Image (cartoon, rainbow, N blue to C red):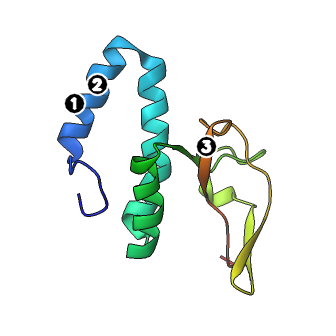
Amino acid sequence: EEFGGLGFGCLESSLIGEEVGYACTGIATAMAANELGQTPVMVAGNDAQKKKYLGWCIDEPIVCSYGVTEPGAGSDVAGLKTTAVKDGDKWVLNGEKMWITNSGQSSWFFCLARTDPDA
């Protein structure tokens, strides 16, 4: 609610997803994928990031995506090869992602990447 959402918990969100999925699995999948992209911001984002990205999803509304799957690793995050390197005040991503639901319509992406090559 603090960032413009309805304040639903897991139970309410699950019930809504189940009902929508009963009527149309395609719409339910798009909704779930959008939520998947938002979840890392909800869990680990600072207040400025939450306000910007979660508020953007509500105000516009827009679609976001969750980029994890890579060639050769699938969704096994232990095999992740994509890297993120800080360059001034920006991050430079280097790697490949595939099978990103909503990617053709997304305005922003959560992209899982390694910042420590030894990790």
**What SS does tag 2 mark?**
helix
Q: Earlier in the sequence, mark 1 or mark 3?
A: 1
Disc 1 and disc 2 in contact, CB within 8 angstroms:
yes
Q: In front here: 118 or 32? A: 32
- Give the alpha-carbon distance from disc 3 to disc 2, as whole Å: 23 Å
Q: What number is the disc on residue 15?
A: 1
* Quarter occupied by the C terminus: bottom right
Locate residue 39, reporting x and y percent: 42, 54
Q: Residues within 10 Å of mark 2 (few under 14, many from 20)?
A: some
Q: Earlier in the sequence, mark 3 or mark 2?
A: 2
Q: In front here: 112 or 5? A: 5
Disc 3 and disc 2 in contact, CB within 8 angstroms:
no
Residue name at image x 61 percent, y 43 percent: 106
- Indicate left or right for 28 with 6 as reference: right
Instruction: Please tell me whether residue 71 is drawn above or below residue 117 in the rendered image.
Output: above
Q: Which residue bears the numbered disc 2?
A: 18
Q: What number is the disc on residue 106?
A: 3
**What SS does tag 1 mark?**
helix
Q: Amino acid at mark 2?
A: Glu
